[in-house]
Structure formats: C-alpha cells, structure tokens
Image (cartoon, rainbow, N blue to C red):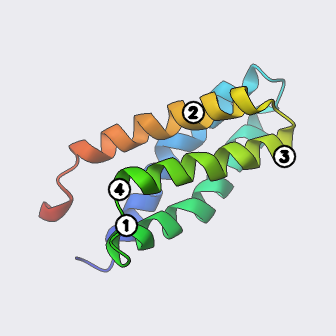
Amino acid sequence: MPEWLPWFALGLTILLEAPLYMLLLRDDDVPMWEGLTIGIAMNCITHPLAWRAIQSWHMPWLGVELAVVMVEMSILRLVFGLIWGRSLWIAGVINAITALIGLLIPWEAL
C-alpha cells in the first residue's frame, strides 16, 4: 500500500463528510462554520483510528464503520446537545454515504 493512501482517504472523507455535516446540522440551528468544523474535527479523530483498525488490526470493516457512527453520534450529542436519535440519524446517514462511495473505489489499484 502506498504511504500516501491513508492521507488520500482521509482527505476524500473530509471533502465528502464535512459539507454534509454542515448542511444537516443547519436544521438544528448550528452555524454553518461550526457544522463544517465539527465534520473536519470528527474525521481527524475517527478516520485514522478506523483505518488502523481495518488495515493493521484486521478488524471487520462493518464493525469499524458502526463504531465510527457511534463515536460521531456521541460527539454530536456532547457538542451540540442533539437528542440521541437525531445524532444517530445524522452520523449514520453521512457515514453510510461515504462508506458506500468508499466501496466503489478500487483501493488496491491506487
């Protein structure tokens, strides 16, 4: 695996997820810059751990994705005081979108 690949994956994830957090949190009266910032920050925390869990520790992809959703849901609840259901919906939808996109990328060919 190329050395740059985890960084590429992180950048792509931030590029996709941060604007989605910004848009979906807008309905909860979260300023757009805060939604964008939390989207970037959460990915800088969860993505490297998820990558390591899958690549080095050989944990199952779906389990890791579910763990990421739980962590990001908890951060949304803690930072913005959203109810658990709303936090789960936002984190779940956004991570499902990027997970599906990730499945379409031929990572082995990069």
Three-letter amino acid code at disc 3?
Val
Q: Are marks 1 and 2 in contact (CB under 8 Å)?
A: no
Q: Secondary structure at mark 2?
A: helix
Q: Position of residue 35 (x, y in %)?
A: 72, 38
Residue beneath the point at 47% across and 64% down: 50
The residue beneath circle 3 is 79
Q: CA distance from mark 4 to mark 2?
A: 22 Å
Q: Which mark is residue 61?
A: 4
Q: Name the quadrant containing residue 99.
A: top left
**Label 4, residues with CA under 10 Å away: few <14, some 14-19, many ≥20:** some
The residue beneath circle 2 is 20
Q: Secondary structure at mark 1?
A: loop
* For residue 87, above or below residue 103: above
Q: Which mark is residue 59?
A: 1
* For residue 59, above or below residue 22: below
Q: Are marks 4 and 1 in contact (CB under 8 Å)?
A: yes
